[in-house]
Image (spheres, grey):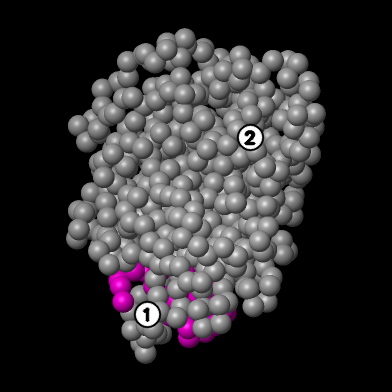
């Protein structure tokens, strides 16, 4: 991932203003520590902090067309850039960067080229011939982007809120699948898939079509000129990504540079469900597995830094971001700059445990549509910003445009959880990879119950967070929360604690408005809470809040909270296979 900052229409174009833009861009350097670039022309500034993944030698940004009349600063990866170059043979390319095609596509097709891009991206483009500009964000919002307005009439764009919050009077999240055009003065949607209307699809389920679509999505994301790996929690989604990547790695160009043995990474409290399952998957696939441990106290100590980087006060996002943040730091220390991850599958297939209570296929499908539309505020934000905090790029095959189109076109009756037919959550995905002749995964992993990442790293993690918040927030503070925080009022001490940290870094009304609110059970939307009357009494985003569904639901949990987890000395773990590298911190 890279960091971009662009400002248009500044009244002040002095050296002091240039220095200010550089200073603000520097706040994004964690996203792109490899190089910094700035294009300044009259009242326009395009800044870039680069994380070099493709063409590290010559792909510095901003990027230009042949005569430098078109300037673009990009955060992202364009997986079909080679195919697009074939359509642009009359153009002369300066670099091997996948992102350079954007400048030439604009030159060739005008503003209507964004849907031609297959990848994850946020970009801002300046046409110096008429001083017009456009900005666009990928279909789902895998990469972050914000838009803001200054009192002097200037328009701002930035990868993270921290780069524009101090200088903009108002700012907001730039919507996924949208493009902003200065010529038209509006934000319009360029991504218009059939599922967006939430009409119920009727395409029959074809397991081979679904399997091939995911394989294609994984393989195209092996495009890299730097060391990479897979985040492996041992759950279905990350295990499938690892299985496909491992199977096809030897055939990829990446194998020529970095070898054909896949690296996998996992983090958890010692003895956590994810560590055990991930190690088993890694052994089965023959990956070079790296296992990291953290303690509850180490996670708590990192909370302020985590909230600063991920720019949210959403409870479940912070719970899951913290171990991912810690893991990314260790991954970067090994020299790895890119990882594949399993985000998006639960939203597409209804994998969260609360989907067990969906009353019919219509509501099931509508809930999946709403979950995908909100991914940029939750899992995409977490995966991108937690890894980018340490200069690591996360790629998400399940959010491939073509894969989503195929998966969301299937009759949702096939996605419904039907115990009478032996169908658990995400059965159609599990079944698609249930190959008896050439298995992708062991059966018990392929059919393992869903664990949310914040649960899977160890149940004591969430319990420890709640205990810590209870020590920091008094009953009186929570009672008066509606007066202190009238917007998205926190209803638990944990939420109140996170909110106070967020407000310290981002005190403006515009900042708090970028975070969604509303009741949720096991990551549901507010609407889905209505599916079970008991859930309204236990509105917690943990998967264990799905009472009567999760095997370790809160009311049935017999887990003993161990004080030695809090003081950093968990019990000894079993012996690790020789292909596993263990890091304890």
Circle 2 residues within 10 Å: few <14, some 14–19, many ≥20: some
Point out the frontmost of discs 2 and 1.
2
Describe residue 100's horizontal placement relative to residue 530 as left or right: left
Q: Quadrant of residue 520?
A: top right
Q: In which quadrant of the rendered image does the N terminus lie?
A: bottom left
From the viewer's side, name the closer residue of 451 and 389.
Answer: 389
Q: Is residue 498 on the magenta stretch?
A: no
Q: Return the residue found at the far top.
A: 563
Q: Residue furthest bottom?
A: 90
- 341 to the left or right of 124: left
The picture places residue 32, in percent across and down from the top left corner, at 38, 52
**Is residue 374 positioned above or below 56 on the image?**
above
Looking at the rendering, in which quadrant would you find the C terminus? Answer: top left
Q: Nearer the viewer, residue 202 or 226?
A: 226
Q: Position of residue 348 (x, y in %)?
A: 59, 53
In terms of depth relative to the viewer, which is nearer, 395 or 414?
A: 395
| Image: magenta residue range | 94-120
Reply above or below: 399 against 287.
Answer: below
> Residue at 47% of width from left, 65% of height from top?
46
Secondary structure beneath dot 1 equals: helix
In the picture of the structure, the residue carrying the numbered disc 1 is 85
Q: Position of residue 229 (x, y in %)?
A: 32, 48
**In the displayed structure image, the side of residue 514 where residue 424 appears, left or right:** left
Q: Which mark is residue 503?
A: 2
């Amino acid at each position: 991932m890279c960091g971009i900052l662009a400002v248009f229409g500044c009244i002040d174009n002095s050296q002091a203003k240039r220095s200010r833009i550089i200073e603000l861009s520097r706040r994004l350097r964690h996203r792109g520590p490899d190089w910094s670039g700035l294009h300044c022309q009259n009242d326009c500034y395009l800044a870039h902090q680069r994380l070099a993944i493709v063409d590290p030698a010559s792909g510095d940004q901003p990027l230009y067309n042949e005569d430098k009349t078109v300037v673009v600063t990009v955060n992202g990866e364009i997986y079909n850039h080679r195919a697009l170059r074939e359509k642009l043979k009359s153009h002369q390319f300066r670099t091997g960067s996948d992102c350079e095609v954007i400048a030439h596509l604009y030159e060739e097709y005008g503003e209507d080229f964004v849907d031609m891009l297959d990848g994850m991206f946020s970009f801002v483009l300046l046409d110096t011939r008429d001083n017009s500009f456009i900005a666009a964000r990928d279909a789902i919002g895998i990469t972050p982007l914000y838009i803001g307005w200054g009192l002097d009439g200037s328009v701002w764009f930035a990868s993270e809120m921290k780069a524009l919050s101090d200088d903009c009077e108002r700012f907001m999240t730039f919507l996924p699948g949208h493009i902003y055009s200065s010529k038209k003065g509006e934000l319009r949607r360029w991504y218009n898939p059939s599922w967006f209307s939430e009409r119920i699809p009727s395409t029959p389920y074809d397991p081979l079509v679904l399997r091939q679509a995911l394989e294609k999505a994984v393989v195209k994301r092996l495009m890299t000129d730097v060391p990479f790996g897979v985040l492996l929690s041992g759950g279905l989604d990350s295990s499938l990504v690892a299985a496909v990547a491992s199977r096809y790695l030897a055939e990829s160009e990446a194998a020529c540079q970095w070898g054909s043995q896949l690296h996998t990474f996992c983090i958890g409290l010692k003895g956590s469900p994810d560590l055990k399952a991930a190690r088993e998957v890694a052994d089965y696939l023959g990956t070079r597995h790296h296992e990291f441990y953290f303690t509850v106290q180490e996670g708590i100590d990192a909370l302020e830094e985590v909230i600063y980087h991920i720019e949210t006060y959403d409870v479940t996002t912070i719970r899951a971001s913290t171990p991912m943040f810690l893991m990314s730091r260790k991954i970067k220390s090994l020299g790895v700059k890119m990882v594949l991850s399993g985000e998006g599958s639960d939203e597409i297939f209804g994998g969260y445990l609360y989907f067990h209570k969906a009353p019919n296929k219509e509501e099931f499908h509508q809930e999946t549509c709403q979950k995908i539309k909100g991914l940029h505020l939750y899992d995409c934000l977490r995966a991108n910003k937690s890894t980018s905090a340490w200069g690591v790029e996360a790629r998400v095959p399940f959010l491939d445009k073509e894969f989503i189109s195929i998966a969301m076109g299937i009759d949702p009756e096939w996605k419904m959880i039907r115990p009478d037919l032996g169908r658990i959550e995400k059965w159609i995905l599990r079944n698609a990879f249930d190959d008896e002749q050439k298995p992708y995964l062991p059966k018990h992993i392929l059919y393992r119950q869903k664990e949310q990442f914040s649960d899977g790293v160890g149940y004591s993690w969430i319990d420890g967070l709640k205990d810590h918040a209870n020590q920091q927030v008094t009953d009186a503070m929570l009672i008066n929360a509606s007066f202190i925080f009238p917007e998205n009022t926190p209803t638990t001490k944990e939420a109140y604690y996170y909110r106070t940290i967020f407000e310290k870094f981002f005190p403006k009304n515009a900042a708090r408005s970028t975070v969604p609110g509303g009741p949720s059970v096991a990551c549901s939307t507010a609407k889905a809470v209505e599916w079970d009357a008991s859930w309204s009494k236990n509105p917690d985003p943990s998967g264990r809040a799905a009472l009567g569904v999760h095997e370790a639901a809160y009311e049935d949990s017999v887990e003993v909270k161990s004080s030695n987890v809090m003081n950093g000395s968990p019990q000894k773990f079993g012996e690790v296979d020789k292909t596993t590298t263990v890091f304890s911190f």
